[in-house]
Image: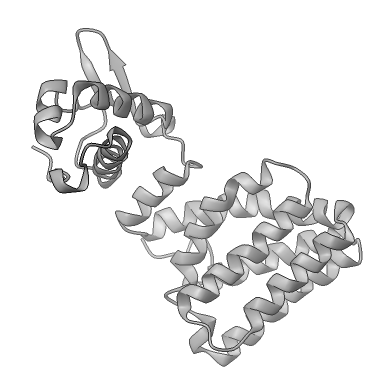
Amino acid sequence: MSNYSAVPVSTIGDNRRTGQLSVVNALGAAILRGDFAIGANLPNEAELTARFSVSRTVIREVMKTLAAKGLVIAKTKIGTRVADKVNWNMFDSDVILWRCQAGIDGPFLKNLFEIRLAVEPTGAALAAERRTDADMVNIRRCLNAMAAPGHSNYSFVAADLEFHIAIAIASYNPFMTSIRPVIEASLNGSLTSQSPVNNANLLRIHMATHTAVADAIEAGDARGARRAMIEVIDDGILARGGDLKGLPT
């Protein structure tokens, strides 16, 4: 028996879309928490309709949504099973959110840093080659927003995220902006616990490394932008444990 909670009827009302999203969130979060083992069957349609007080049509749409995210596989006469993790779409914003809600541990944060190292330095290099004057204005605006006083931990993370997304946009490769949920989860996992907001020296280093990325992009220095972005990501790793191998498990 799983330990996820049924969505209260009062939050669903008569709106099918609201009901569908509520059930998707409840079941998706339950799967990412590990309430259902890999390969295990989800409760059948009749049980789910009763548990969530929604129609069979809603449950079927929920299963289609979860299947599209790679979380479940439906088979005739077998039922709907939790798919192997290799099938989960970890770039999906909902999937990442549910995983973060389950807890950002060392191995998960390490995975986030690894994919950022694989993608973001190339994005910065492309931005150095392709950025427009308007892109550069936006990148500098985001950098200035990070340096502004009075940040909370979370507002600083938001400003930092927009800086990285501005660079992804300036790369003019649409796949670069698709990793926004990955960057956001990584920043939340690293900066909220070791926030530059509460450490003047850490803030100085953080701003210096980010400024170096912006300077290299403005100069059209693709190699320099790549190196500087690697240093930015390494800076986040150092704040958590020294290196990727040293991240807590």
Residue 154 point in image, percent of width and height: 46, 73
Coloring applied to the structure: one colour
Residue 3 point in image, percent of width and height: 12, 45
Q: Is residue 175 visible?
A: yes
Residue under the point 66% across and 61% down: 164
Is residue 188 toward the left or the right of residue 16 in the image?
right
User: Compared with residue 236, is residue 44 higher up or lower down, i.e. above or below?
Assistant: above
Looking at the picture, tell me which residue is in the foreground, 38 or 25: 25
The quarter holding residue 77 reads top left
User: Compared with residue 67, is residue 170 higher up or lower down, i.e. above or below?
Assistant: below
Residue under the point 52% across and 52% down: 182
Residue 108 point in image, percent of width and height: 42, 53
Residue under the point 33% across and 35% down: 17
User: Compared with residue 23, is residue 118 higher up or lower down, i.e. above or below?
Assistant: below
The quarter holding residue 150 reads bottom right
Looking at the picture, tell me which residue is in the foreground, 106 or 163: 163
Q: How many marks can you see?
A: 0
The quarter in which the C terminus is drawn is: bottom left
Is residue 38 toward the left or the right of residue 89 in the image?
left
Is residue 130 toward the left or the right of residue 186 in the image?
right
